[in-house]
Amino acid sequence: MTTSTLRRALTTTATVGVLLLAATACSDDSSAEQTPTTASASSSAPASAPASASASPTGSDRSTPMDIRVTIDGQEVEATLNDSPAARDLASLLPLTLDLKDFHGTERIADPPRKLTTENAPEPLAPKAGDLAYFAPWGNLAIFHKDGPSASEDLLVLGHIDADADGLSGADRITIEATS
């Protein structure tokens, strides 16, 4: 089983678990209180993001994936964003088309139209090939085509792009869109 297939299976399993958790949380008397929160969510965020956020007040929802549509040099690939505040902030900017440039032979970088929030950032992770990350001091997005350096509080992993490293290493343009 390939890493990509395993990742998709785990993502599907996690999504089903979150939906079951949300359904269970909505089945008690507090469902009337949760409905307005879900209805007042930004129209640019996927409908599932607010529901999972309201079902998990502890903050553990940061690992709940949010599907996005990514096109790299004209080829569509599967991708997800995690549910961290920075990833949700990136989702609020979609759709985005950005020109990429090489950085240290490890990642392709681009500048979003504005800096993303870094409040309530999850624990730092060392980036892996395929990770979409945000480097807070410079305010740029990074797509890793090789495993990155050790974990750093300045580098926030926002999600993952399911594309081969060779395709990512030479990428010149990326379009990121919300799925409907």
Image (spheres, rainbow, N blue to C red):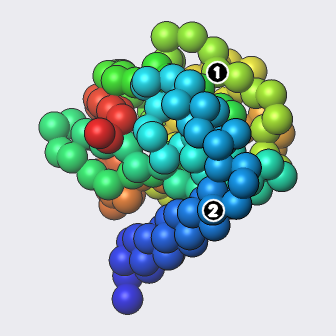
Q: Nearer the viewer, residue 119 or 142?
A: 119
In three-dimensional space, the C-alpha distance between marks 2 and 1, rounded to whole angstroms, equals: 35 Å
Please provide percent x and percent y for residue 147: 58, 58
Q: Nearer the viewer, residue 129 or 180?
A: 180
Quadrant holding the N terminus:
bottom left
Mark 1 crowdedness (10 Å alpha carbons): few <14, some 14-19, many ≥20: many
Considering only vertical position in the picture, is 41 above or below 66? Answer: above
Q: Does dot 2 land on a helix, a strand or a loop?
A: loop
- Give the residue number, with chain letter if any, for mark 1: 116
Q: Amino acid at mark 2?
A: Ser
Please provide percent x and percent y for residue 22: 60, 59
Task: Name the residue furthest top.
Answer: 113
Residue positioned 50% across, 75% down in the render: 13
| Nearest-to-viewer mark from 2 and 1 | 2
Q: Which label is found at residue 27?
A: 2
Please provide percent x and percent y for residue 35: 59, 39
Q: Please give left or right for residue 118 compared with residue 98 in the image.
A: right
Q: Please give left or right for residue 5 compared with residue 135 in the image.
A: left
